[in-house]
Amino acid sequence: MKTVDIIERIEGEAKLHLSWKNGKVQDAHIAFLNFRGFEYMLQNKPALDALVYTPRICGICGQAHLYATVNALENIYSNANIPLEITPKAKSLRQLGLIIEIIQSHIKWFYYFIMPDINQQSHHFDEKFVPLKGQSWLKAQEASSSIVKALATFAGQWPHTSYMIPGGVVSDPTFMDMIFVENYIDKAISFFEKQMVGVDLSHYLSFSNAEDITHIQGDVNQFIQMSFEQGFDTIGQSHDRFFVISDDLGFAKGKIKNKNTVKVDLNKIEESSAFTFELDVQKQKKEKYTWAKTVKYDNLFYETGPLARALVQNRKQIKSLHKEYEDTILTRVMARVDEIAFLLHQSKELLQSISLNEASFIEPKIALKEIDEGFGLGVIEATRGSLQHKVDIKNGLIQRYDVITPTVWNLGPGNSLDYGVAQKAIIGVKSLHEATMILRSFDVCSVCTTH
Amino acid sequence: MGNKPKVVWLQALTCNGNTQSFLSSNATRFEHFLNAFDLVYHPSLTHQMTLSNLLNSSFDIDFLLVEGAITANTNFFSLVNKSVKDILQQLVQRSMYVVSVGSCASYGGIHAKFERNSDISGVQNSLDNLLPRSQHPIVNLTGCPVHPEWILQTLFTLQTKKSIQLDSTHRPVELYSHLAHHGCVRNEYFEWKVESKSFGLKEGCLFYDQGCRGPMTHSSCNKILWNDISSKTRVGMPCIGCTEFDFPKENLFETKKNIGIPAEVPLGISKRAYLSLTGVAKTFKIERLNKKIIDENS
């Protein structure tokens, strides 16, 4: 039996093709059918304009694209041996912006994309998780719209600011501005403590083994109960290989294969279009079924994102959950929850260390348009995982721009000889609900996947 | 409950930025919206209603909000196996009012820059003269993204007054008659022609070198502040003109000049008037405006 279902509430939609045998998924194809062509749009555009274009790849993770672009453009300078000075202050304001964006995204994902479905299927259905009506849903809207005020304080607005620029950041916040930022971070901490986990942040951060999840109260406790009820501690396993591209924001860079954490060599990342639609309809082939590309490291699929980051960084609570429950839905969701705590803590540290007396921006000695030819690589850890931008410029204009998003790592297509990460995680499940929840556990972003 | 106006949010070629902007509404205002309207379908938010459910139903829609550019080319974009142009036309006929949320829905926006698909445009151009049931013209809320308050105020106004006054490009005049420049905290630097020496400073106007389009751009970004807090120009980012129909232009971070004079002068001001005033203003060297605005050493 074959089924085709449209999956919504994933920042766009995807088509899930499943083949069933004896009540289990035997083969799965995930198709993203919408393509916007950002890499094509950027051709022949002035290099700096990429700072306005790439955030618009994605409305929910635009700051990650902005950061990746600014890294790529600054890398052009270093590849051309032109010294460029970025002050620690500018760097901290960039990191803080990305951290805030990741936190608001994780909150929305948990309450808008995970809880409604899992609640609906539970025998312990709770009105408070119902979209647009439930108290927890509404509190999540308040919390996510509140923490972005911290970002707007030094970035002007969210979404879609381009406050990072080669040489630093455009803004020069005051001490009071940064106190205001801290107030909103503290408000987010309070939301995390009171609404999500029901324990103090410091207590939460001291959790170090799998049993500690029994101390969690609040909405996350209900998630955990419902997960066990629906068997989400036993499904969703994939290749169990993990990849983190950048150590910015306090993460650790590296990969895990066969439980060993080792360094990564970015030259081993390879993108392919074997299953990806052609722009030219005449060249379409049968095996091409999605606009997403495929990306592998050293010819293997790797999972990227919060679970990968927690494991590569050796965060104890998630490490022990992974040991107990493997790379299941439960572990993946808890890794995102855990990352909220980690990043809230990181943002407080950043605020402590920032020195406002430094310059926000130091003008590069040469403008990008004065560099005849150049190449730049920018990598960053975005909400959903590893993000890479590559740019070639000539006489100030972009010749080629290539983006590999986290969701390409996780949702990119493979075939039965070698399944992609999410694809493999779905094989063997017993219902569409299980398959959908596994997809959701990767925090699918359809617009990023195909860009 | 049942009498609340029904709102449907359709997403076409989009980054979801307007949805994210909408979700970043002031929480009190957002809750007020949810109490006053019935958001029956939104692809990221509603749990029970899917797009297929919506298209198979026949209830009257009060407000159709469209996010994203429209295309009939299903090689690049389709929803539930249909072209989004067909879906749009079907829904418009069921709707009392139609609002284009954001620059992409208004005229194609950044998505129209993907030239391999030559069939990308805004809602109005995709309707083949079709109008919603009220015969009210399509309302364009430009902006990349649109400010959430602009959406809320438009909806509440249409609900109360049944119509809204629009400019020649179908934008509500009350939201788009001001310029982004109005209310910018750097205005005094503009008055006395003091340019910002570089990015990353509180001082100076971004119009002269950094490419700020505030004086040429219709928007209330500095009147209705972003996230209740600030705006791009307030913190030091040039206005990129994202509420105008020619967005995105090129070289957004530098001011195009001819012999040292900005190629574009503030809207409705003749070049002669602008140059005369600039000439006079520049003869005064105003010490206060050339110093740090906050002097930590004083």
Image (tube, coloured by chain):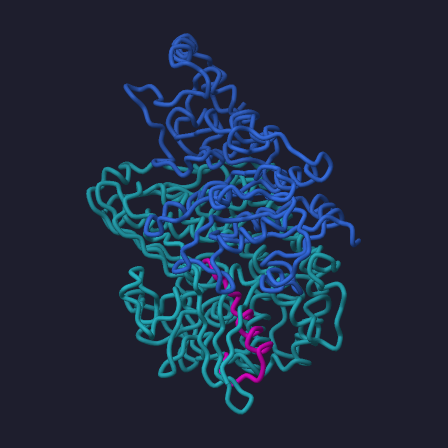
Chain colours: A cyan, B blue
- Whether residue A95 can be seen here: yes
Q: x, y (%) of residue A134?
A: 74, 60
Does A396 sit left or right of A444 as displayed?
left
Give the residues in magenta.
A426-447
Q: Quadrant of residue B97?
A: top right
Does B253 sit left or right of B286 as displayed?
left
Q: Is residue B246 above or below residue A442?
A: above
Q: Residue furthest left?
A: A372
Q: x, y (%) of residue B283?
A: 40, 8
Q: Quadrant of residue A220?
A: bottom right
Residue placed at 57% from the left, 46% from the top? B21
Q: Is residue A322 above or below residue B21?
A: below
Does A6 sit left or right of B269 as displayed?
right
Q: x, y (%) of residue B229?
A: 61, 37
- Position of the C terminus of chain A, as image quadrant, is bottom left
Q: Is residue A433 magenta?
A: yes
